[in-house]
Image (cartoon, rainbow, N blue to C red):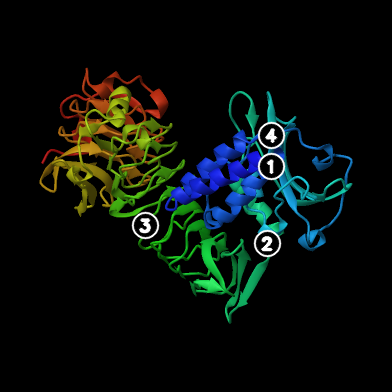
Amino acid sequence: MKKLLVILITLALLLCTLPATAEGALEAAAQSVQTAATLDEQLALLHEVSLECASELENGGWEASLTCEPAQPLPGDLLFKTEMEEAELSVQDFKGAKFIAIYDDQGTYRLLGDWQVRIPEAMRAASLEEADAVLCLVHTTQSRDDYIGFASNRNYYAYVYHRGDHVFTTAYHILTTPPVTGYGSLSGERLSLSDLWSGVRQWFYGVIEVSYPEGTATYRIIGQTCCLAGLEGEFTRYEIPAEVEGYPVVGIEDCRNDALEELVLPEGIVWIQTVQGENLRKMNFPSTLRRIEKDVPEGLDEMILNEGLMEIGDFALMHGSGEAFSLPSTLKTMGRGVLKGADCSAIVVPEGVTALKDYFLMHYSRVLCVFVPASVTTFGTDLFDYGGIRIYTPEDSAAARLAKYRGYEWVPCERAQDMSIPMYAVEDGFEYAILEDEAILTGYSGDETCVRVPDTLGGCPVAIVREDTFYKNDALRAVLFPDTVRKVEGSAVYKCEELEAVFIPASVTELSSSAVYSCGVDAVLYAQEGSSAFEQPDGNSGWPHHEVWTPGAEEAWFPAE
């Protein structure tokens, strides 16, 4: 008991010395819980931190893991058993009960501290003696017999039952399946405890329904606060209130409504999980917002992210708009697929971000350059559209080393302010951008069937032909590139069924193996002997048949002027 008192006093001192950083307090608590000598000490510590950091835990706090090995073996009457009988039980059937949270991870038991601290205070056990009910997360895998090789589903069940009882109820269940294709052992995605808690907390906490002439908004209570959990009806504009029945609104769990055109968020919103709507065009981001966890709509007329935003989750922000899209300087973490399809000309990654994960700036439409600060030291796979985006970065940075190793185009640049911003324009049907005194051809909207690309656009030499410049142009018969062009990207001429001829000059030294791809079966690529285009194997990766570009060969499509 004396040791428990010392631990609690130590934790209280740590919490007092870190008033501005709840994350630091949680990290200190996590270390104390892991090193505690008994289950009672662990539960008491978890209860204490749940009270001291209630606001942080309601609105996040997942960075510091409170889930750990139990200090001593768990009593058998706490553990879930397959012979138990299932019944439909609600939270009302556990009135007055005190819960302990346990994680059965494929037969390995842990004290599920990350959930223990988020159980409603009145239902949270602070000692083993108090624990007369159990919240048990069970994670199992289930093999599949419809794959070649080994594949398995993942099952997550959250069971609720009284201690020592033989009856349980399923509070939540989710299954993840393996990818359709792949190599090696395939399995469903492993889900995080935070994602799983989003489903489990629905069982513990009540909801408030607010009626309007247009429909109903549902708010879920999550302790001392609440979040928007649903919006049903014919709303074209919805303004989320700052509080509902005395509960401050701190998050958006789920807002999906295709009739919605404008969503107004109040100050006080801290996190967003899912916002979707086919017609949603206006949405603000309040200064209090700290996390975008899953989905924000792609079709917003304007997206101005707030200073103070710190985290963007996997695939949560696929698009950015404007010429130079600004990520907040406060941003620290970006998940996989962030800005995968950005619709802007330039991106600045803020100083302080340390990792660019898989699919960053892949399948872009207009991005031409990106500034990557020296703070980024970790890189995932499938980035920068495989070099199609020019990287501006300090000379000795990890991004510079990556660019050199992979052969990506890059420019030494110490500060984001020094990066060149591309300017888009259209001239005689040629869509292009100017970057570093070069014209980059990005599209063609004219009606010529035989297109002679000019050697200058906007007063600058045409140097690069981008992906999809000529895409599904069914009228196109021939394309002639000027000898100012040095680079032709993959699928620059793509799916042009009536294409007969493409002329690529010897000035092109960077040529994708799929630059002219999936076009007419009789298409011919004309290239000068010894050039990059001529050296490509005939028929390689969808290339058309190619022939030597002899003087005057182009006149069949482009008569001499």
Of badges 3 and 4, the one in the foreground is 4
**CB atoms of marks 2 and 4 within 8 Å:** no
**Circle 1 SS class:** loop
Which residue carries the number 1 mark?
A: 1
Q: Quadrant of residue 551?
A: top left
Where is 505 relative to 136, above or below? above
Which residue carries the number 3 mark?
A: 305
**Circle 4 SS class:** loop
Of badges 3 and 2, the one in the foreground is 2
Q: CA distance from mark 2 to mark 1?
A: 33 Å
Which residue carries the number 4 mark?
A: 71
- Disc 4 marks which amino acid? Ala
Question: Measuring 41% from the left and 26% from the top, which residue is drawn there?
Answer: 541
Which residue carries the number 2 mark?
A: 205
Q: CA distance from mark 3 to mark 2?
A: 31 Å
Of badges 2 and 4, the one in the foreground is 4
Q: CA distance from mark 4 to mark 1?
A: 15 Å
Nearest to N terminus: mark 3 or mark 1: 1
**CB atoms of marks 2 and 1 within 8 Å:** no
